[in-house]
Amino acid sequence: MEKPDNVAEKPNLLPYGSNVGAPSIRIENIQFWKETKVNKVNHLFDEKFNSIKKDYEKLLEEYEWNNLVYKSNFNFEPTIGQTYYLYSSDDDKTFLSLIEPNQWNKKYIGSFFLNHECKWVKV
């Protein structure tokens, strides 16, 4: 049996209406949806980036303090869990001491605690 030209074999699979009485198919404007989702995701990326940046800056600061303390002069083996004091001498060299800043008149840089990882933590 031959079908007329205006009848589709599987009208439910067509991307458009197959007869005059079929509802019109309109493509929805999803631009607003895209813009709101892009803004939301970009905000999440910005927050994550700022968090990573803050962690990086903290890590860099810890590295610089550790580098300064380890390059300073000291003639003793530091004990883990002990607080030490970093000073600058008259010739601008740094040295580590057990003597607290209020006990003498030297240029005080900072107090440092040696933790279990042998990392100097600024107090």
Image: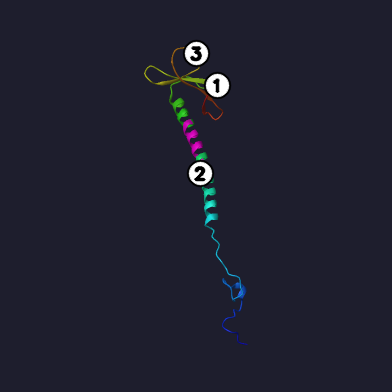
Residue type, label 1: Gln
Please tell me the numbered disc located at residue 102. 3
Judged from the image, the secondary structure of the residue bearing numbered disc 2 is: helix
Decide: is 16 above or below 122. Answer: below
Residue type, label 3: Asn
Residue type, label 2: Asp
Could you tell which of marks 1 and 3 lies nearer the N-terminus?
Answer: 1
Report how many numbered discs are placed on residues in the image.
3
What residue is shown with label 1?
Answer: 82
Please tell me the numbered disc located at residue 46. 2
Estimate the spatial distance between the alpha carbons at disc 1 and disc 2, rounded to whole Å.
Answer: 40 Å
User: Which residue is found at the position 43% from the left and 23% from the top?
Assistant: 72
Q: Is residue 45 magenta?
A: no
Q: Residues within 10 Å of mark 2 (few under 14, many from 20)?
A: few
User: Which residue is found at the position 53% from the left and 21% from the top?
Assistant: 83
Residue range of the region highlighted in magenta in the rendering: 52-61
Task: Look at the numbered discs 1 and 3 and tell me whether their residues touch, using CB distance below 8 Å.
Answer: no
79 and 49: which is toward the camera:
49
Q: Is residue 60 magenta?
A: yes
92 and 118: which is toward the camera:
92
Left or right side of 69 for 21: right
Could you tell which of marks 3 and 2 lies nearer the N-terminus?
Answer: 2
Q: Residues within 10 Å of mark 1 (few under 14, many from 20)?
A: few
Judged from the image, the secondary structure of the residue bearing numbered disc 1 is: loop
Closer mark to the observer between disc 1 and disc 3? 3
Left or right side of 69 for 19: right
User: Which residue is found at the position 39% from the left and 21% from the top?
Assistant: 93
